[in-house]
Image (tube, helix red, strand yellow):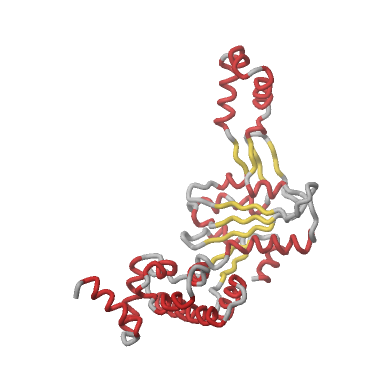
Amino acid sequence: LKEAVNLAITLQRPLLLEGEPGCGKTRLAGAIVYELTQKQLQGQQDKDGNPLWWDYRVWNVKSTSRAREGLYFYDEIARLRDAQLVGSDPQRLREFLGENETDQLKARLKDRQNYREFGPLGEAIRNTQTRSVVLIDEIDKADSDFPNDLLLELDTLGFEVPETGESIPPPDQKPILIITSNREKPLPDPFLRRCLYFYVDFPNQEQLLKIINRRFGQSNRKQKQLIDIAIKKFDEMRQLLEDSPGSRPPGTSEILEFLTALLHPSQQIDQAMKDLNTLANRLPLLGILLKTQPDQQLYRDILLKTQPDQQLYRDLISGEEAESGE
């Protein structure tokens, strides 16, 4: 992954990241910003004494997003409203707003640039001081035309604003672009050709344990035992559901939330261990890992079939019998 980032920076190409939801794709851009801040700015401060951070901009793509919004937004409605206010009855407007505010309104109306606002990518292209880092998050949420509408801008990293007549040239130091996708929709080939591609693999057990230790810090003996059992059950759950079409195995974010619940200061370790050992019958906890009722039922059914002799599954059966009155 580090090599892919360095290649993207060297070749001045967007880095397209795919991988399971919750595997950390979105966090990569922030990590790059952190590294650049530490290595290049080295504790520098602004005029107010606040730490300086590397220029970082986020474009959160939605289903209604349009490619132009990342570059700029021009508010035609606001300009039309101002023109109507000034042109309808200037004398009454002056009486209502006052001399100063009326003059400000007229001055704003004369300059179209007052109704133009640059988006995250547009601001990064205009930044000539440093190579900005731009995250275009979940590009697959938008419609199929969205990636194609960005082709020219990804090639040249310059753009036009026809409403104001502005021409924004490509910067000498092109932004570092990180684009994420969850594969909700296929991305067009012309768009893919302009990107470097990297698939973020799910962490193995060693990597996962390292992530957990970083998140939760030093653990005592009981906590470590609890974490080891939780990881084992989490791994079994993923293996059980990975081969089931339509199921969504839990990811990194789910196991971290799961452990946060188990290791919460208000939770006794012995009770947490009991909850973990009867997880199939602890639906609120199970809901942290499995997000749909069919996945939860499938998990419970598989465990009852494959390991019916274990105590936790006998507890599960007895609990269901008690609920049914049998």
Q: Point out the image quarter for the N terminus.
A: bottom right
Q: For residue 233, what is the image quadrant?
A: bottom left
- Horizontal placement of 74 versus 264: left or right? right
Q: Residue at x 33, y 79 (%)?
A: 302
Q: Residue at x 80, y 47 (%)?
A: 47
Answer above or below: position of 237 versus 170: below
**Which residue is farthest left?**
326
Q: Residue at x 80, y 61 (%)?
A: 42
**Which residue is farthest bottom?**
309
Q: For residue 53, what is the image quadrant?
A: bottom right
Residue 315 location in percent, x, y? 31, 79
Residue 187 location in percent, x, y? 51, 59
Residue 101 location in percent, x, y? 66, 22
Q: Point out the image quarter for the C terminus.
A: bottom left
**Which residue is farthest top?**
91
Answer above or below: position of 123 versus 193: above
Q: Nearer the viewer, residue 2 or 295?
A: 295
- Horizontal placement of 33 versus 45: left or right? left
Q: Nearer the viewer, residue 224 or 122?
A: 224
| Number of marks in picture | 0
Residue 193 location in percent, x, y? 59, 61
Q: For residue 110, what is the image quadrant?
A: top right
Q: Nearer the viewer, residue 97 or 39?
A: 97
